[in-house]
Amino acid sequence: MNRTYELMFIVRPDMAEEDLDKLISTLETAVSTSGGTVKSVERMGKRRLAYVVRRFHDGVYVLLTVEGSGGLVHELERRLRVTEPVIKFLSVRIDEEQKRLAKIKAIRDARKKTPPAPAATAEGGEAAPATA
Amino acid sequence: MPEEAKAPTATAAEPPPASEGHSQRPPSRGPRPAGGPGGSREGGRKYFRRKKVCKFCVEKIESINYKDVRLLAQFVAESGKIVPRRLTGVCTPHQRRLSCAIKQARNIALLPFAGRAN
């Protein structure tokens, strides 16, 4: 039951860099203890929020991609909820979307491999009604 | 850039044909309602409405992700509302994904729920 999830969370802007490092490393250890793997951690930096959250106008966005079961996400969400500097978070399951995109890409690539003959016929077919 | 410019002009062009259709309807064609956004049948009407096309189908954008604020912002009105399909021309499957993505982006404060009140 390995699924890929994306957890995006916002920490308050006045948080020190070291504290953020510590927070991310604790989350990473939490992931590994619950039997998951961290695929990537991306700091998207400070951004202006679209609306005021807990009286903050800005926030530091962090994106965490993990692989694991639903229980892992439950645990991570619980941790984020009790962590005081985290002002907002969102977890999204992304493996099915990735699968869908890979499928579409495969279809497109397959079509690209045999372009000459079908493309010529398609052009001829298109040109006829356009002139008529 | 051209897409952004296209959307407002399309919305601006919306009201005049509708009003004209109302005034013309009784004498010429009785019960026929002035066709919706399609406008393929131009019965001597002044306004030519260009057929709207789905941006995602044309440009082959497959992934509609909540993180792509620039893309999503094109389909959100100034007030923060999701722009309806009839104005943007987005096809149903893409509009469905789009609205999901916009709602996710709202939840993580990438897009506003309503207006620029702050």
Image: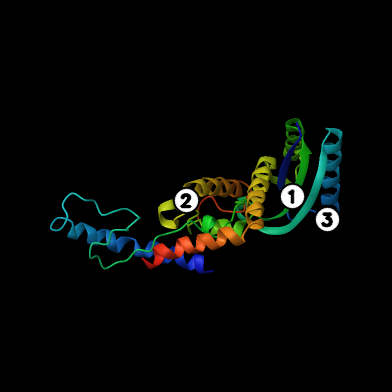
Task: Tell me where residue B54 appears, x and y as whole percent.
Answer: 48, 56
Q: Earlier in the sequence, mark 3 or mark 1?
A: 3
Task: Tell me where residue B37 appears, x and y as whole percent.
Answer: 35, 55
Give A40 or A89, whichever is nearer the viewer: A40
Task: Tell me where residue A23 appears, x and y as whole percent.
Answer: 82, 46
- Mark 1 lies on a secondary structure that is strand
Residue kind at label 1, given as amino acid type? Leu
- Circle 3 is placed at which residue position? A17
Whole-angstrom CA distance, mark 3 to mark 1, is: 16 Å
Give the number of the disc on residue B91. Answer: 2
- Mark 3 lies on a secondary structure that is helix
Q: Quadrant of residue B13?
A: bottom left
Residue kind at label 3, given as amino acid type? Glu
Residue kind at label 2, given as amino acid type? Cys
Label 3 CA crowd tier, 10 Å (few <14, some 14–19, many 20+): few
Label 1 CA crowd tier, 10 Å (few <14, some 14–19, many 20+): some
Whole-angstrom CA distance, mark 2 to mark 1, is: 30 Å
Whole-angstrom CA distance, mark 3 to mark 2, is: 44 Å
Give B66 or A10, whichever is nearer the viewer: B66
Horizontal relation, residue B85 to residue A92: left or right: left
**Camera-nearest label, 2 or 1:** 2
Is label 3 on the same chain as label 2?
Answer: no
Disc 3 vs disc 1: Cβ atoms closer than 8 Å? no
